[in-house]
Amino acid sequence: MMRPGPANIFATLIFASIIFGVPIIQAVLELRQGEQPQALDVFAQKPTVDNLRAYEASLEEASWAVKNLRPWMQYVQFVLLKEAGEKALIGRNGWLFYRPAVEYLTRRLVTHKGVSGPGDPLHAIIFFRDQLASRGIQLLVVPAPNKVSIYPEMLTRRAQGTGGVMCPETRELYYELQVAGIEVVDLFAVFHNAKEKRGGASARAFYLAQDSHWSPAGAELAAKAVAQRVLERGWVKPGAVEYAETPVRLRRLGDLVRMLQVPQIERRAPLQDVVCEQVVRQDSRALYQDASDSEILVLGDSFLRIYEQDEPGAAGFVAHLAKELKQPLTSIINDGGASTLVRQELHRRPQLLANKKLVIYEFVERDIRFGTEGWQLIPLPPASAAGVIR
């Protein structure tokens, strides 16, 4: 029988010191503060499954090691092991990717043809279309591609030269919506074609390197593509408001860095220089503002919020769409909630449908499978109750 070598013995001692040292240090700290060691609480209640789970959670929440050592361990994992935790993946050249978006692309979902239900986006969108059609309102669907779908080569070198990867689930939804007679703007094709002309991931990429959202250039490109479809279909006529653009420079910390919740990483993460084009009225130079009596209602998630409702304001998708259409719009925006929550908000505020001719419905691609609250059927109030003007 082989004897363990010095390296194995040393590693065992280190592991044992961590296992036994942390609770001892925790108990000493609690005694110095005049408190009873929390570890003894386990003897003060019945050893049921629920009590033991609650005890474990309270230990972790109060643990000195968790509060002081875990962030440093996560920082070491991030730097040395290229491990970013549950919400992010580390790509190439400093790029980060939202893990659920990557899982949406890489994990295949077994579907059963012809079966629809509360979790089925096709069924929910058709139901929504029919609700709007009964009021004489058109629907335009605009899925926003995941960053990894447009820049897979920045996640892994093996995707170099692919130009982009569309998830079969996304492709199937596009096809089924078109078969159902629902208009869809294929932003995947729009971004792919523009990326090919630009030559890949450049400084003017259509998505931010350390953020899950599109860049200002991406938001503007998407707005132009949607406006072109709206005008081609003649659903509304161009308005009479002339807008201009004013450049604003920002330094942003990506949302994927903030999701890690590790101060050591946040302090060392480079801020990304971002140039936004704020939309202003030519006559008054006032920043773009929504108008509740617009003929167009835009629904969407954080892809509409970025640059629009947060810094610098009036520089996101909605403002640039208004500029292209020469008229202010009405919008409902809910971070992460485009699959169901924005339609629930519309149910609560049916007056926003007054005077509407078109609803533009944006949602991020991953929500096709992972949408918050699923894809519920949300009936709209009767047109009379909504005060709809036709």
Image: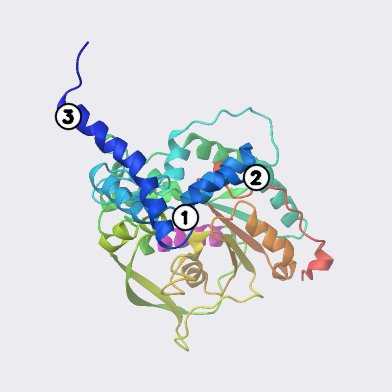
- Residue 257 x, y percent position in the rendering: 36, 57
Q: Which of disc 2 and disc 1 is earlier in sequence?
A: 1
- For the residue labelled by badge 2, is the local secondary structure a helix, a strand or a loop? loop
- Report the side of 331 relative to 207 (left or right): right
Does the image show residue 254?
Answer: yes
As for residue 223 lying within the magenta part, the answer is yes
State the CA–CA distance, disc 3 to disc 1.
Answer: 34 Å
Query: Label 1 amino acid?
Result: Ala
- Residue 45 x, y percent position in the rendering: 63, 44
Hey, which quadrant is residue 135 in on the image? bottom right
Range of magenta residues? 219-232
Residue carrying label 1: 62
Residue carrying label 2: 181
Disc 2 packing (10 Å; few <14; some 14–19; many ≥20): few
Disc 3 packing (10 Å; few <14; some 14–19; many ≥20): few
When the figure is inspected, residue 345 is found, relative to residue 145, above or below; the finding is below
